Every structure is written in C-alpha cells, then in structure tokens.
Image (cartoon, rainbow, N blue to C red):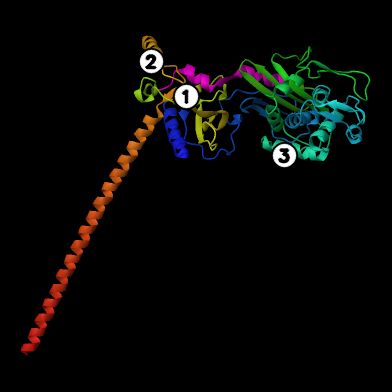
C-alpha cells in the first residue's frame, strides 16, 4: 500500500511539473547514461586559454563541468594526492587520536622532500597531522596518517583507490599517501575535482586548509615548537591573492610539474578549479578559470527560483478547493541547485524525474536538470507531512486580494494537497473503470451463452432432419 501511495504521488508530481515554466521530460530510465560535455553546446561560453597541459572548472555543489581542457588525461598529481589522504583521515579517524610514527613512515620518503622533521616514535594528534599535511605538505606525516587509518601504507593506498571509485573517479590509481613520483600513481583533473568536491563542505577540512598559520607545540621527541604557514598563494597576501578563495592544495615534482586544486566562493557561486602539468603557470590558469566561471555563470537554488518565478499554473494554485487545507505537500529540497550560463534562462532547462527507491525516506523522486544533454544540477522532490500546518483563511484571502490587485500569479512555493480527496478521486476513477470492464465482460458472456444456445438449436434441427431422412428411407425399403 505504501508503494502504491508513493507511486500515485509521483504521478501527481509529474502532472504538477507539467504546468511549470520548464519543460519536464519523461521519467529517467537510465541514470548512468554518459553525459554530454559543455563543448557540445554551441551557445556555451567560450572558455579561457590555459598555458598548462590540463585543467578543469566545476561547480562545487552539482559537479557540473563548466570548462575542461584534457580533463580526463592521466597525469601525475604530486602533493594534491594529499587531498584524498585528508578525506580518508577525516572519515575514519578522530582529531584527538594520537599518531605514533614508525621508522618506515619517517625514513621511506626522499630526504629533500617536504617534511616537518618528524622522528621515529614521535607522537602527534591527528589534528596536528592534518595541519602539517595540508599547510606544510609533509610527506612523512602522510605516511603516519596512512598507517594510523589503515594499519599500513599499502592498505591505505587500497582504501584510496576504493574511495576514488566511490566518488566516480574513472582514471585514478594511487600507490602512496603523499604523491611522490611513482609511474603507477596517477589521476586526472576531473577525478581530482571530484575528490575536492567531497571535501569542500567539510567544516573541519575548510578550517584547517584555509588557515594562514599553525603552531605544533613541543612533543615527546621535539622540544621546540614547529611553525607552519600557508603555501597556497591565492590564500596569502601575494600577487596571486584572489577574492573568494577558501581552500586549496599545491603540488610539485619534476615529473608532475606544478599541480593545484582550489576552491573559491562568491555569493551563491561555489567553484573548484584544478590545474595539472604546468610550468609555474598553475596560479595563472586557475585564476583564468575562476574569472571565466564567476563572470559567465549564475547559480540558482531551484526551490527559491520556483518561489519567486510565479510560474505555477492557476489550476494548481491554492484557490482550487481540492488543493487547500492539506496534511501533505510536495516541495523541492533546499539543496536543489543548478548552474546556468548567463546567456540562458530557466526556461531553457530540461528536467527528468526518477522514482526514489528509499522506502524510509520522504524523498519521492530525484530530479536531474540538464540542457542539451549537459547535466546542470540535481535535487529532490519531497513528500512533506504537514499535519501540524493549518490553513489560514484570512492569510489566504489577503494573499488572493493582493494577487488580484497586482495581477500576478501566486508566489507560494509549496503546493498543499488534500491527499485523501486526491486518492478518493483516483479511487472513484478506478471503480468506474472496473465497473465498465465488468459490464463489458457480462455482455460478452451473455453473447457467448446466446451463441452457444443457437448453436445447440441448430445442431438439434440438423439431428432431427437426419432422423426424418432415415425414417423415410426405412419406410421406402419396407414397401419394397
């Protein structure tokens, strides 16, 4: 019964969406279908010319690719690898945990690589390690965290690859936690953007990664304090300081060149830029991509856009009796975001619904927003139990008067539905359908009975004729 109820609500939801200002497509049959890229759209804004080998710009909420250059090319990541190390540490350890550094963790790295001079047997908290990892890019600290989280560096590399696959990375293979060169250690700009996307809404990560400086107090092996400073120049007072930059990670090896992952926010826009295999132009390329994104795109919260657009049909307005005084409502989730080029409007957006399979959730359906095959965002259609909400007739009357005076449609974003009346209407329709079907079957059965009777009568007549013929023949024989 519950599944039937959800299915009926989805049918009504699809009916409701047909009256919006957007073109809503049929239910999505295959969510895993490969998506087109922005390069397939002729009206998509022209991206910047990058100096490096590869780069990508995505929306941090939706994952929408706004610009890409060789974004799926496998390249060496260098120390931006530590973003995955940070993600797994935050997901699998507490900041107050104590990391004890083994000999292998300390001495298996190159002596001249980035480090904070940790010694064998030294103990640091996970929080201290995270600052050393993200600010100082300390390689031995990455090893120590790998051992603490997974019990060993090889096991941690396996965790990294499994997590990358879960995030949708398609051309990534990690063999260590720090990113020092290994021919089998590679990733892509797009995959690194997905890893960063999984981090940017983690408050702990942002707090640590955005810090200008940090002090590690004396430890059991180190009598002096260690002073760490931010190395990402877009976060510092430098020539590359960029308005809105929140967090990021640098990387460099001779084989990888300069690599850079950066997260920036301006207003409602949240962007992630990745630059790889550059020759000291990683900041220039990143700034060029951010300028392109912030100047040519706008982020829309579809729940709020729906509220302010006034696009709902009058048929579905709250003035219709069946939709008043309700204990349930259909609402777009507050995280229903899309990213749209400035030369496009919401009217250009196409959408598709997929019935949610989560039986315990109030998510009725998942919504995907797209344009010419390019995914622009997503959201959820929620079935809200509003039993505690009561219809205010005075407020409704005032709103109607105001709307009539201004000759504008209602801007109420929540459509209240009297579910029981709706179900009663559907039930009445079903009863009528089955009644008509029953009557048709009865008529067909009656016709069938009459046909059988007529057939039997015809058969009896034939039998009597044959008997009469036989009797006549017998009489003729007797006479002879």
Asked if the residue under mark 2 is in contact with the one under mark 3, i.e. CB atoms within 8 Å, the reply is no
Mark seen at residue 386: 1
The image quarter in which residue 58 lies: top right
Q: Residue 196: in sight, yes or no? A: yes
Residue at point 69%, 34% (across, down): 72
> Can you give x and y, in whole percent of width and height, for residue 325 in the image?
39, 22
The secondary structure making up most of the magenta span is helix
The image quarter in which residue 313 lies: top left
Label 3: few (<14), some (14–19) or many (≥20) C-alpha neighbours in 10 Å: some
Q: Residue 285: in sight, yes or no? A: no
Asked if the residue under mark 2 is in contact with the one under mark 1, i.e. CB atoms within 8 Å, the reply is no
Mark seen at residue 393: 2
> Can you give x and y, in whole percent of width and height, for residue 224 in the image?
93, 18
> Can you give x and y, in whole percent of width and height, for residue 330 in the image?
47, 27
Give the magenta range. Answer: 286-313
- Which is more N-terminal, label 1 or label 3? 3
Residue at point 12%, 78% (across, down): 469
- Distance from disc 3 to disc 1, alpha carbons, whole Å, reads 41 Å
């Amino acid at each position: 019964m519950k599944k039937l109820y959800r299915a009926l609500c989805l049918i009504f939801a699809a009916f409701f969406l047909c009256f919006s200002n957007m073109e809503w497509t049929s239910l999505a049959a295959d969510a895993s279908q490969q998506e087109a890229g922005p390069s397939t759209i002729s009206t998509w804004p022209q991206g910047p010319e990058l100096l490096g080998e590869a780069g990508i710009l995505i929306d941090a909420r939706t994952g929408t690719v706004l610009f890409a250059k060789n974004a799926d090319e496998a390249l060496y990541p260098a120390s931006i690898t530590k973003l995955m190390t940070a993600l797994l540490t935050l997901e699998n350890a507490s900041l107050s945990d104590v990391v004890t550094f083994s000999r292998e963790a300390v001495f298996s790295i190159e002596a001249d690589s980035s480090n904070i001079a940790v010694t064998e047997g030294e103990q640091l908290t996970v929080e201290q390690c995270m600052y050393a990892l993200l600010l100082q890019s300390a390689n031995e600290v990455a090893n120590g965290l790998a051992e603490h989280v997974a019990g060993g560096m090889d096991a941690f590399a396996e965790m990294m690859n499994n997590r990358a696959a879960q995030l949708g990375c398609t051309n990534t293979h990690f063999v260590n936690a720090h990113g020092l060169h290994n021919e089998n250690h590679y990733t892509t700009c797009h995959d690194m953007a997905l890893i960063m996307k999984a981090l940017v809404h983690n408050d702990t990560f942002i707090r640590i990664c955005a810090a200008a400086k940090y002090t590690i107090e004396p430890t059991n092996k180190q009598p002096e304090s260690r002073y760490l400073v931010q190395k990402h120049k877009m976060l510092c007072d430098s020539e590359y300081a960029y308005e809105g930059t929140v967090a990021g990670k640098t990387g460099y090896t001779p084989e990888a060149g300069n690599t850079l992952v950066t997260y920036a926010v301006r207003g409602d826009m949240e962007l992630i830029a990745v630059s790889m295999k550059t020759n000291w132009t990683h900041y220039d390329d990143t700034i060029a991509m951010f300028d392109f994104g912030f100047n040519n795109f706008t982020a829309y919260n579809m729940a709020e856009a729906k509220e302010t657009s006034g696009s709902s049909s009058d048929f579905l307005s709250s003035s219709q009796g069946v939709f008043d005084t309700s204990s349930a409502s259909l609402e777009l989730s507050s995280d229903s975001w899309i990213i749209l080029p400035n030369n496009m409007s919401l009217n250009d957006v196409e959408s598709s619904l997929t019935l949610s399979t989560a039986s315990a959730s109030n998510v009725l359906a998942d919504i995907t927003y797209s344009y010419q095959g390019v995914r622009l965002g997503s959201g959820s259609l929620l079935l809200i139990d509003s039993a505690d909400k009561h219809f205010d007739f005075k407020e409704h009357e005032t709103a109607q008067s105001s709307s009539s005076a201004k000759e504008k449609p209602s801007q109420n974003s929540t459509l209240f539905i009297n579910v029981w009346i709706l179900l009663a209407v559907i039930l009445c329709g079903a009863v009528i359908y089955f009644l008509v079907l029953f009557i048709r079957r009865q008529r067909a059965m009656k016709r069938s009975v009459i046909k059988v009777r007529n057939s039997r009568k015809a058969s009896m007549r034939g039998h009597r004729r044959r008997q009469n013929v036989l009797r006549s023949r017998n009489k003729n024989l007797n006479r002879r």
